[in-house]
Image (spheres, grey):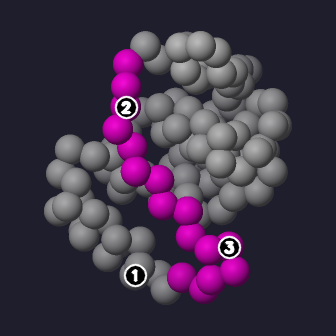
């Protein structure tokens, strides 16, 4: 399964050493949803090599969320794990990805 379309997603990755109050994600969701009404907003609650735990603020396709998280991890964190496992609202998605002259290609793996 791959994507042939652009998908607007705002990922929030907190400082891993920060202590988050339970209400912060809900407050962020309200504020960002008001500022970006057409955007998909997702808080990455946990992140380590080859893994991320993602909590989208609105219903969204788990594969699309996982694809965006995996691209950010690979491009910005130099995470070269294959596959990258992303848990999206208790749905585990394993994705592989590659970059070519047209951009990122992401596909789901078993």
Does 17 appear above or below 34? below
**6 is within the stretch colored magenta:** yes
Splitting the image into 4 quarters, where does residue 105 fall? top right
Residue situated in front as seen by the camera: 53 or 74: 74
Q: Main secondary structure of the magenta part?
A: loop
- In this rendering, does residue 30 appear at all? yes
Q: Which mark is residue 80?
A: none
The mark lying in front, picked from 2 and 1, is: 2
Along the polypeptide, which appears first: circle 2 or circle 1?
A: 2
Q: Look at 20% across and 61% down and name the residue there.
A: 35
For the magenta stretch, what is the residue range?
5-20
Name which quarter of the figure residue 31 lies in.
bottom left
**Crowding at label 1, few (<14), some or many (≥20) Cα neighbours within 10 Å?**
few
Q: Are marks 3 and 2 in contact (CB under 8 Å)?
A: no
Cα distance, mark 2 to mark 1? Answer: 27 Å
For mark 3, does the 10 Å Cα neighbourhood hold few (<14), some (14 to 19), or many (20 or more) residues? few
Q: Earlier in the sequence, mark 3 or mark 2?
A: 2
Q: Secondary structure at mark 1?
A: loop
Q: Is residue 39 above or below residue 32?
A: above
Q: Position of residue 110 (x, y in %)?
A: 73, 21
Q: Which residue is mark 2?
A: 7
Are dots 2 and 1 in contact, CB under 8 Å?
no
Query: Label 1 near label 3: C-beta < 8 Å?
Result: no
Q: CA distance from mark 3 to mark 2?
A: 26 Å
Asked if one can make out residue 2 in the rendered structure from this viewpoint, the answer is no
> Percent from the top left, x then y, of residue 15?
62, 74
Viewer-side residue, 28 vs 59: 28
Q: CA distance from mark 3 to mark 1?
A: 17 Å
């Amino acid at each position: 399964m791959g994507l042939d379309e652009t998908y607007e997603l705002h990922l929030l990755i907190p400082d891993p050493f920060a202590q988050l109050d339970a209400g912060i994600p809900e407050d962020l969701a309200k504020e960002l949803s008001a500022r970006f009404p057409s955007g998909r907003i997702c808080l990455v609650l946990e992140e380590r090599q080859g893994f991320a735990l993602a909590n989208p603020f609105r219903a969204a396709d788990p594969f699309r969320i996982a694809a965006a998280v995996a691209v950010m991890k690979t491009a910005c964190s130099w995470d070269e794990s294959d596959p990258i496992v992303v848990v999206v609202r208790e749905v585990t998605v394993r994705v592989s990805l590659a970059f070519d002259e047209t951009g990122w290609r992401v596909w789901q793996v078993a």
